[in-house]
Amino acid sequence: MTKRKLVMSKRNALLLSAAKESDADVRFRLGASYDFHDPRDAIAAAAWYRVAAEQGHVEAQNLLGEALRDGPSELRDLKEAVTWFQRAAKAGDAWAQVSLGHAYHEGEGVRREQRLAFDWYKRAAKGGRPEAMFNLGLCYREGEGVARDLSAALRWFQRAAAQDHPRSTYLVGHALWWGEGTREDRRKAVMWFLRAAKHGDIDAKSYVGMAYHDGVGLTKDLRKAVAWYKQAAEAGNSLAQRHLALCYREGEGVRKNAATAQRLFARASRARSSRPATRT
Protein backbone atom coordinates (compact mmCIF):
# COMPACT_ATOMS: atom_id res chain seq x y z
CA MET A 1 0.00 0.00 0.00
CA THR A 2 1.38 3.43 -0.96
CA LYS A 3 1.87 6.12 1.68
CA ARG A 4 -0.96 8.19 0.15
CA LYS A 5 -3.35 5.24 0.22
CA LEU A 6 -2.36 4.47 3.81
CA VAL A 7 -3.11 8.06 4.85
CA MET A 8 -6.47 7.95 3.05
CA SER A 9 -7.32 4.63 4.69
CA LYS A 10 -6.54 6.00 8.16
CA ARG A 11 -8.45 9.18 7.37
CA ASN A 12 -11.53 7.22 6.28
CA ALA A 13 -11.40 5.24 9.51
CA LEU A 14 -11.22 8.47 11.48
CA LEU A 15 -14.13 9.92 9.48
CA LEU A 16 -16.25 6.91 10.28
CA SER A 17 -15.28 7.06 13.94
CA ALA A 18 -15.92 10.83 14.12
CA ALA A 19 -19.35 10.34 12.57
CA LYS A 20 -20.30 7.68 15.11
CA GLU A 21 -18.70 9.13 18.22
CA SER A 22 -18.49 12.49 19.95
CA ASP A 23 -14.89 11.95 21.07
CA ALA A 24 -13.07 15.30 20.76
CA ASP A 25 -9.68 13.60 20.38
CA VAL A 26 -10.88 11.59 17.36
CA ARG A 27 -12.11 14.79 15.75
CA PHE A 28 -8.85 16.57 16.58
CA ARG A 29 -6.81 13.74 15.01
CA LEU A 30 -8.98 13.93 11.91
CA GLY A 31 -8.26 17.65 11.65
CA ALA A 32 -4.54 16.95 12.08
CA SER A 33 -4.74 14.35 9.32
CA TYR A 34 -5.99 17.03 6.91
CA ASP A 35 -3.46 19.53 8.29
CA PHE A 36 -0.23 17.52 8.26
CA HIS A 37 -0.66 14.66 5.78
CA ASP A 38 -1.16 14.70 2.01
CA PRO A 39 -3.58 15.29 0.43
CA ARG A 40 -3.90 18.35 2.65
CA ASP A 41 -7.02 20.45 3.07
CA ALA A 42 -6.73 23.53 5.32
CA ILE A 43 -10.48 24.19 5.27
CA ALA A 44 -11.37 20.64 6.33
CA ALA A 45 -8.64 20.69 8.99
CA ALA A 46 -9.98 23.92 10.48
CA ALA A 47 -13.55 22.60 10.43
CA TRP A 48 -12.61 19.51 12.44
CA TYR A 49 -10.39 21.51 14.77
CA ARG A 50 -13.37 23.77 15.44
CA VAL A 51 -15.61 20.83 16.37
CA ALA A 52 -12.96 19.48 18.75
CA ALA A 53 -12.12 22.95 20.09
CA GLU A 54 -15.75 23.65 20.94
CA GLN A 55 -15.72 20.40 22.92
CA GLY A 56 -12.79 21.78 24.95
CA HIS A 57 -9.87 20.06 23.22
CA VAL A 58 -6.97 22.39 24.09
CA GLU A 59 -4.57 21.41 21.29
CA ALA A 60 -7.39 21.79 18.78
CA GLN A 61 -8.09 25.27 20.15
CA ASN A 62 -4.48 26.28 19.56
CA LEU A 63 -4.31 24.82 16.05
CA LEU A 64 -7.64 26.40 15.16
CA GLY A 65 -6.13 29.72 16.24
CA GLU A 66 -3.12 29.06 14.02
CA ALA A 67 -5.38 28.19 11.10
CA LEU A 68 -7.35 31.42 11.56
CA ARG A 69 -4.09 33.39 11.78
CA ASP A 70 -1.99 31.73 9.07
CA GLY A 71 -4.42 29.85 6.85
CA PRO A 72 -5.85 30.79 3.43
CA SER A 73 -7.66 34.12 3.09
CA GLU A 74 -11.12 32.59 3.36
CA LEU A 75 -10.20 31.29 6.83
CA ARG A 76 -8.25 34.22 8.16
CA ASP A 77 -9.72 36.03 11.16
CA LEU A 78 -7.16 37.48 13.59
CA LYS A 79 -9.69 38.47 16.24
CA GLU A 80 -11.19 35.00 16.44
CA ALA A 81 -7.69 33.50 16.37
CA VAL A 82 -6.86 35.46 19.52
CA THR A 83 -10.03 34.17 21.20
CA TRP A 84 -8.93 30.57 20.66
CA PHE A 85 -5.35 31.30 21.69
CA GLN A 86 -6.69 32.80 24.90
CA ARG A 87 -8.77 29.73 25.69
CA ALA A 88 -5.88 27.35 25.03
CA ALA A 89 -3.32 29.58 26.78
CA LYS A 90 -5.42 29.83 29.93
CA ALA A 91 -5.68 26.03 29.90
CA GLY A 92 -1.88 25.84 29.95
CA ASP A 93 -0.94 25.22 26.31
CA ALA A 94 2.56 26.70 25.96
CA TRP A 95 2.38 27.04 22.17
CA ALA A 96 -0.84 29.06 22.52
CA GLN A 97 0.82 31.20 25.19
CA VAL A 98 3.63 32.04 22.75
CA SER A 99 1.10 32.87 20.03
CA LEU A 100 -0.98 35.00 22.39
CA GLY A 101 2.14 36.85 23.51
CA HIS A 102 3.02 37.49 19.87
CA ALA A 103 -0.51 38.77 19.16
CA TYR A 104 -0.25 41.27 22.02
CA HIS A 105 3.27 42.28 21.02
CA GLU A 106 2.34 42.94 17.39
CA GLY A 107 -1.25 44.08 17.94
CA GLU A 108 -2.64 41.32 15.71
CA GLY A 109 -6.35 40.81 16.40
CA VAL A 110 -6.03 42.60 19.73
CA ARG A 111 -4.82 45.95 21.04
CA ARG A 112 -1.05 46.07 21.29
CA GLU A 113 0.02 45.64 24.94
CA GLN A 114 3.68 44.81 25.42
CA ARG A 115 3.37 44.10 29.14
CA LEU A 116 0.76 41.42 28.46
CA ALA A 117 3.00 40.04 25.69
CA PHE A 118 5.85 39.78 28.19
CA ASP A 119 3.64 38.07 30.77
CA TRP A 120 2.43 35.42 28.30
CA TYR A 121 5.95 34.78 27.02
CA LYS A 122 7.04 34.25 30.61
CA ARG A 123 4.30 31.71 31.24
CA ALA A 124 5.25 29.84 28.07
CA ALA A 125 8.93 29.94 29.02
CA LYS A 126 8.08 28.28 32.32
CA GLY A 127 6.41 25.60 30.20
CA GLY A 128 9.75 25.00 28.49
CA ARG A 129 9.18 26.66 25.11
CA PRO A 130 12.52 27.97 23.71
CA GLU A 131 10.61 30.34 21.40
CA ALA A 132 9.16 32.03 24.47
CA MET A 133 12.59 32.23 26.11
CA PHE A 134 13.93 33.87 22.95
CA ASN A 135 11.09 36.39 22.90
CA LEU A 136 11.63 37.17 26.59
CA GLY A 137 15.27 37.83 25.78
CA LEU A 138 14.21 40.26 23.06
CA CYS A 139 11.81 42.00 25.48
CA TYR A 140 14.63 42.52 27.99
CA ARG A 141 17.08 43.59 25.28
CA GLU A 142 14.69 46.18 23.80
CA GLY A 143 12.91 47.20 27.01
CA GLU A 144 9.51 46.06 25.71
CA GLY A 145 7.01 45.39 28.49
CA VAL A 146 9.83 45.35 31.04
CA ALA A 147 12.80 47.50 32.00
CA ARG A 148 15.75 47.09 29.65
CA ASP A 149 18.24 44.60 31.10
CA LEU A 150 20.94 43.16 28.83
CA SER A 151 22.13 40.68 31.46
CA ALA A 152 18.60 39.26 31.81
CA ALA A 153 18.28 39.17 28.02
CA LEU A 154 21.46 37.11 27.78
CA ARG A 155 20.26 34.66 30.44
CA TRP A 156 17.07 33.96 28.49
CA PHE A 157 18.97 33.61 25.21
CA GLN A 158 21.28 31.12 26.93
CA ARG A 159 18.33 29.08 28.19
CA ALA A 160 16.82 28.94 24.70
CA ALA A 161 20.22 28.18 23.16
CA ALA A 162 20.54 25.20 25.52
CA GLN A 163 17.61 23.77 23.51
CA ASP A 164 19.39 24.55 20.21
CA HIS A 165 17.21 27.53 19.33
CA PRO A 166 19.27 28.93 16.40
CA ARG A 167 18.55 32.63 16.79
CA SER A 168 19.17 32.57 20.53
CA THR A 169 22.44 30.74 19.95
CA TYR A 170 23.50 33.54 17.60
CA LEU A 171 22.45 36.22 20.10
CA VAL A 172 24.52 34.63 22.88
CA GLY A 173 27.49 34.95 20.54
CA HIS A 174 26.52 38.51 19.65
CA ALA A 175 26.37 39.48 23.33
CA LEU A 176 29.81 37.99 23.96
CA TRP A 177 31.27 39.61 20.82
CA TRP A 178 30.09 43.11 21.77
CA GLY A 179 30.05 42.80 25.57
CA GLU A 180 26.27 43.23 25.89
CA GLY A 181 25.20 42.20 29.39
CA THR A 182 28.47 40.38 29.92
CA ARG A 183 32.21 40.83 29.55
CA GLU A 184 33.42 40.89 25.95
CA ASP A 185 34.92 37.55 24.91
CA ARG A 186 35.22 37.25 21.14
CA ARG A 187 36.95 33.87 21.16
CA LYS A 188 34.05 32.36 23.08
CA ALA A 189 31.59 34.26 20.88
CA VAL A 190 32.95 32.52 17.78
CA MET A 191 32.10 29.12 19.24
CA TRP A 192 28.48 30.24 19.62
CA PHE A 193 28.46 31.66 16.10
CA LEU A 194 29.70 28.33 14.72
CA ARG A 195 26.91 26.50 16.56
CA ALA A 196 24.28 28.91 15.28
CA ALA A 197 25.68 28.78 11.74
CA LYS A 198 25.38 24.98 11.73
CA HIS A 199 21.70 25.47 12.53
CA GLY A 200 21.41 27.83 9.55
CA ASP A 201 21.48 31.27 11.19
CA ILE A 202 22.57 33.71 8.47
CA ASP A 203 23.89 36.46 10.75
CA ALA A 204 26.04 33.88 12.55
CA LYS A 205 27.57 32.85 9.21
CA SER A 206 28.55 36.46 8.62
CA TYR A 207 30.36 36.61 11.97
CA VAL A 208 32.13 33.30 11.28
CA GLY A 209 33.40 34.92 8.10
CA MET A 210 34.66 37.87 10.13
CA ALA A 211 36.38 35.51 12.57
CA TYR A 212 38.23 33.76 9.74
CA HIS A 213 39.03 37.10 8.09
CA ASP A 214 40.57 38.63 11.23
CA GLY A 215 41.87 35.44 12.86
CA VAL A 216 39.70 35.88 15.96
CA GLY A 217 39.04 32.56 17.70
CA LEU A 218 39.91 30.76 14.46
CA THR A 219 43.06 30.51 12.35
CA LYS A 220 43.10 33.37 9.84
CA ASP A 221 41.97 32.05 6.44
CA LEU A 222 40.78 34.56 3.84
CA ARG A 223 39.40 31.91 1.48
CA LYS A 224 37.25 30.44 4.24
CA ALA A 225 36.17 33.96 5.21
CA VAL A 226 34.98 34.58 1.64
CA ALA A 227 33.13 31.24 1.58
CA TRP A 228 31.23 32.10 4.77
CA TYR A 229 30.54 35.64 3.59
CA LYS A 230 29.11 34.26 0.35
CA GLN A 231 26.70 31.96 2.17
CA ALA A 232 25.36 34.82 4.26
CA ALA A 233 25.43 37.38 1.43
CA GLU A 234 23.42 35.15 -0.90
CA ALA A 235 20.76 34.88 1.81
CA GLY A 236 20.53 38.68 2.00
CA ASN A 237 22.75 39.52 4.99
CA SER A 238 23.89 43.12 4.53
CA LEU A 239 26.93 42.83 6.80
CA ALA A 240 28.23 39.86 4.81
CA GLN A 241 27.52 41.65 1.54
CA ARG A 242 29.57 44.63 2.68
CA HIS A 243 32.50 42.52 3.90
CA LEU A 244 32.41 40.42 0.74
CA ALA A 245 32.44 43.62 -1.32
CA LEU A 246 35.57 44.72 0.56
CA CYS A 247 37.20 41.35 -0.18
CA TYR A 248 36.51 41.78 -3.90
CA ARG A 249 37.70 45.37 -3.81
CA GLU A 250 40.96 44.51 -2.01
CA GLY A 251 41.51 41.04 -3.48
CA GLU A 252 41.38 39.28 -0.10
CA GLY A 253 40.66 35.56 -0.50
CA VAL A 254 39.31 36.21 -3.98
CA ARG A 255 40.47 37.83 -7.22
CA LYS A 256 39.96 41.61 -7.32
CA ASN A 257 36.78 42.65 -9.09
CA ALA A 258 35.69 46.27 -8.72
CA ALA A 259 32.37 45.76 -10.54
CA THR A 260 31.36 42.88 -8.26
CA ALA A 261 32.40 44.91 -5.23
CA GLN A 262 30.20 47.80 -6.35
CA ARG A 263 27.18 45.54 -6.91
CA LEU A 264 27.61 44.04 -3.44
CA PHE A 265 27.88 47.46 -1.80
CA ALA A 266 24.61 48.43 -3.51
CA ARG A 267 22.90 45.21 -2.37
CA ALA A 268 24.09 45.79 1.20
CA SER A 269 22.64 49.29 1.20
CA ARG A 270 19.24 48.04 -0.01
CA ALA A 271 19.21 45.11 2.45
CA ARG A 272 19.90 47.34 5.45
CA SER A 273 16.92 49.54 4.66
CA SER A 274 14.45 46.68 4.18
CA ARG A 275 15.44 44.09 6.80
CA PRO A 276 12.42 42.85 8.82
CA ALA A 277 12.30 42.44 12.58
CA THR A 278 13.04 38.93 13.89
CA ARG A 279 10.70 37.43 16.46
CA THR A 280 8.98 34.09 16.89
Image (spheres, rainbow, N blue to C red):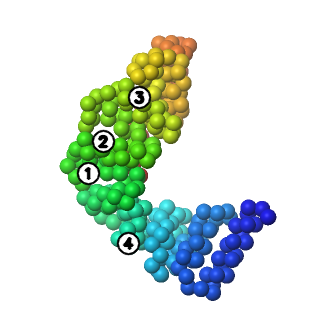
Measuring from the top left, give residue 137's x and y in whole percent. Answer: 31, 47
Dot 2: element: helix
In terms of sequence position, does the residue under pointer 4 or pointer 3 come before the other? Answer: 4
Residue at (32, 27) in percent of width and height: 185
Image quadrant in which you'd find residue 153:
top left
Three-letter code, disc 3: Val
Residue located 47% across and 76% down the image: 57
Q: Residue at x 47, y 64 (%)?
A: 66
Q: Secondary structure at mark 4?
A: loop
Q: Are marks 2 and 3 in contact (CB under 8 Å)?
A: no
Badge number at residue 190 = 3
Would residue 174 appear left or right of 18 to someone viewing this image? left
Give the residue number, with chain letter if any, for mark 1.
Answer: 144
Is disc 1 surrounded by few (<14), some (14 to 19) or many (20+) residues within 10 Å? some
Q: Residue 264 versus residue 32: which sits nearer the camera? A: 32
Is 122 on the left or on the right of 34, as rendered? Answer: left
What amino acid does circle 2 point to?
Leu
Q: CA–CA distance between discs 1 and 2?
A: 15 Å
Image coordinates of residue 23 in percent, x first then y, are 55, 82
Q: Which residue is mark 4?
A: 91
Residue assigned mark 2 = 154
The spot of residue 75 in percent (x, y) is 52, 69
Toward the bottom, the furthest residue is 20
